[in-house]
Image: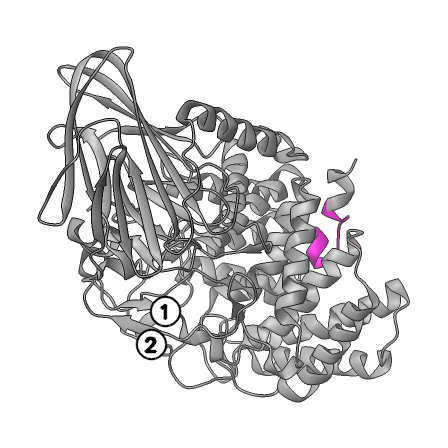
Amino acid sequence: MARIEDYGLIGDTHTAALVSNRGSIDWLCVPRFDSPACFAALLGGDEHGHWSIRPAGDSQGQPSYAGDTLVLGTLFTTAEGQVELIDFMPYPSREDEVDIVRIVRGLRGRVAMEMEFIVRFDYGSVVPWVRRRGWGLEAIAGPNALRLRSPVELKNKDFQTRAAFTVAEGDTVAFELLWYPSHRQPPEAVEPISALNETIDFWNEWAGRQRGSGRANPLVKRSLITLKALTYSPTGGIVAAPTTSLPEHIGSTRNWDYRYCWLRDSTFTLYSLLQAGYVDEAKDWQQWLMRAVAGKPDQLQIMFGLAGERMLMEHEIDWLPGYEGSRPVRIGNAAHTQLQLDVYGEVMDSLHAARSNAIDLDEASWHFQRQLLFALEDLWQQRDEGLWEIRGPREHFTHSKLMAWVGFDRAVKAIERFKLEGPLDRWRRLRDEIHAQICERGYDPARNAFVQRYGSTDLDASLLLVPLVGFLPCDDPRVQGTIEAIQRHLSDGVFVRRYDTAGGIDGLPPGDGAFLPCTFWLADAHIISGRYDEGKRIYDQATVACSSLGLLAEEYDPVARRQLGNFPQAFSHVGLINTAHNLMDHGGPARERAGTGQSPGAQSRA
């Protein structure tokens, strides 16, 4: 099994596949990010579905993207010669199809190649009915149909398909895999080279629209391309990751399904898109957000499906052994039923950022925001599961109260700045009450730091957001004490853990990696505190966690020097983008969110 960072991402803004540096597609869900996988070897073995093309024997290639695209090339060098495997997914002509094209190009000598194709629908559990065709094979099981077009002879045995062929210098051998609903007529096959050129043009055009100070940073550009790849284009929703159950700690049970859209990511995502000049994508994301949260405010969820679905029931599948034995494998996410008060503040903050950056919000959106605040008036004093989605008892988490404060603060600012209607005096009083309570019950004078929950002395990296959301100024001794304590006790000086899992607060066995978004928050906190060099040092060392392709998972183990958690993770890439802009603009989106700088869109539109 390849390491997490040894995978490359290809996608079509409907779904995505992970391709290992050994030329194997080990993960693909069809037709959407959150659909069942037909290749699930990532969470098991080859027998659970994969599609490999590589030189005969055990060969490891050197992957790279074709410029600013999502076209992945893997270079294989053997004693006999050299070949390149090109993988990409053309943009679909309709929502209910998925197309993968794989092209083998001979560069030098003559290289013996082998292909293995094992398709297993429903996460590796369903063996399809396979029929030979003149152009390859067809596989059908229930609603799913696949067509594999192959120019070389295919041999089927024991419910597996293999092929052996030789590629000489100058040769091109192309394969196409097409998924479609089994009750529909299949789409026409694509012409591989034309599809390749069109896909390259699509991504180059999109990447070429980037604006702002981050254009020269290749990691920022790759992160933006990754965000686009994780966008479900029919709705504008952005999935947290295209995978499920990649572990936060190898061999642990901290394995979750991240193929959904979290509200918590909304403000950070909006800033990263606006800072890069992707106003249309920011609008699409904001409009997805409004559709998803529409309804009764006290039924607000922390996450939704790609089109705003609410029922994300969690269950475990026992036939997959998990990545490197990390069980269980989970489908769905039970956290969608949790009470997490911070999402009210995140939604208010996101819509305030949209309004501040001239993204048009209709009258109904402010009406909805007011209803959110009316609900939060009754909810904010309750215990909740917090942003880390604990599986233990509810607590009074300081971060949850902090974001409740953000909710009322942004409402007050909206009324004052945009002359909107609302109970200004009441919300000012509530804002002040929450502020005073946090300073009294969420701050430990002995540690000179804000703490994870009321009555505790435990630290939590989410409190790095205290200055970043404008709760207190950067020069406040309590803010500086919090930054110092978190860096000393929850990090190795660079990589930041969310909290001490040994305390058992989350109801799970201890152990996890450093959380990459928190690491970027630490850099941001130093930057807006005026310690530019320290922020840059943390950013520069944190980006060492990027794979050779510039991709980031959710977490990183700085001792084993490997990525952990679902991959690639949108939140990690958003953190990288925002911190890069904070460095380049000496504050950037961090200062704007904290209320001490200009709107990111002002520079992007200049």
Q: Judge whether residue 384 is colored magenta.
A: no
Disc 2 residue type (three-letter): Gly
- The residue furthest left is 158
Disc 1 crowd rating (10 Å Cα; few below 14, some 14-19, many 20+) is some
For label 1, the residue is 500
Q: Quadrant of the C terminus?
A: top right
The front one of 5 and 430 is: 5
12 lies left or right of 588: left
Residue occupying the point 57% across, 88% down? 382
- 154 over 38 or under it: above or below: above
Q: Name the spot of residue 152 as percent of width and height, x first.
A: 21, 27
Disc 1 residue type (three-letter): Asp
For label 2, the residue is 503
Residue occupying the point 37% across, 38% down? 100
Residue occupying the point 29% across, 39% down? 148
- 584 over 377 or under it: above or below: above
- Disc number placed over residue 199 in the picture, else none: none
118 lies left or right of 290: left
Q: Name the spot of residue 405 as percent of width and height, x first.
A: 68, 74
Q: Judge whether residue 596 is colored magenta.
A: yes
Helix or strand or loop: what does disc 1 sit on?
Answer: loop
Helix or strand or loop: what does disc 2 sit on?
Answer: helix
Can residue 557 be seen here? The reply is no
Q: Name the spot of residue 128 as percent of width and height, x first.
A: 22, 55
Q: What's the magenta region?
A: 591-600
> CB under 8 Å between callouts 1 and 2?
yes
The front one of 324 and 192 is: 192
